[in-house]
Image: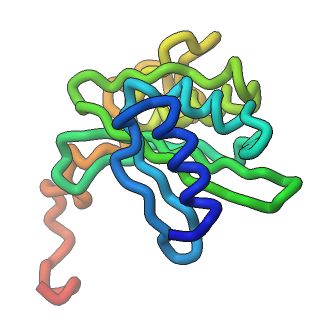
Amino acid sequence: MNDTLKLISDKIEESFKGAVLSAEELYNFNVITVQHEHIHPILKLLKEDEALNFHFLTDLTGMQTADEKQLGVIYHLHNLYKNNRVRIKTYFDINKPEIPTVTDLWPSSNWMERETFDFYGVRFKGHPNLKRILNVDEMDIFPLRKEYPLEDQTREDKSDKMFGR
């Protein structure tokens, strides 16, 4: 564990006992997985703590686990002064896809959260205008969830041997 990753995970653990599920360096990138119940105060700590100062939200996106039972949100934060980056991940049950908004910390997260809602169905509690941003309003599915087959099963013009099966 590098010094920056240790500092970040120690600060989080100091304030929120047991909130850090894992802290690792993957492909030269600091990655910390935390409990979703503490995500908003953890992100606030990372932004406002003078030693950490992760004041820039580079990206926010959704994901679904391979077992298809959980959704998650990934936050990429950047301290521009020290050029430190961290990826914060959190997971929650797919049947209760709710997490607090971070628009109060980073107003730029507004559209990122709307996109994540649109494609994964994650509801950001407290979001000022959570509605679809790219798909039609009438759409009742979330297209990036792994709930649907990748190919149209009714097509007859495709042969499996074309795809090496």
Q: Residue at x 64, y 28 (%)?
A: 44
Q: Residue at x 68, y 58 (%)?
A: 85
- Image coordinates for residue 42, horizontal then vertical, percent: 55, 32
Residue found at the far front of this picture: 14
Judge from the rendering whether residue 92 lies leftward or rightward of residue 86; answer left or right: left
Judge from the rendering whether residue 103 lies leftward or rightward of residue 139; answer left or right: right
Judge from the rendering whether residue 89 lies leftward or rightward of residue 109; answer left or right: left
Q: Nearer the viewer, residue 129 or 22?
A: 22
Quarter of the rendering containing residue 94 = top left
Quarter of the rendering containing residue 114 = top right
Q: Eyeballing the image, is 43 above or below 82?
A: above
Q: Nearer the viewer, residue 44 or 93?
A: 44
- Image coordinates for residue 32, horizontal then vertical, percent: 47, 52
Q: Residue at x 62, y 36 (%)?
A: 112
Judge from the rendering whether residue 16 lies leftward or rightward of residue 6; answer left or right: left
Q: Residue at x 16, y 52 (%)?
A: 67
Residue found at the far right of this picture: 81
Query: Where's the C terminus, which quadrant?
Result: bottom left
Q: Nearer the viewer, residue 19 or 165?
A: 19
Quarter of the rendering containing residue 103 = top right
Q: Indicate the colouring scheme.
A: rainbow
Q: Eyeballing the image, is 69 above or below 76?
A: above
Q: Eyeballing the image, is 97 above or below 90?
A: above
Give the mark count: 0
- Image coordinates for residue 154, horizontal then vertical, percent: 14, 54
- Image coordinates for residue 93, horizontal then vertical, percent: 24, 31
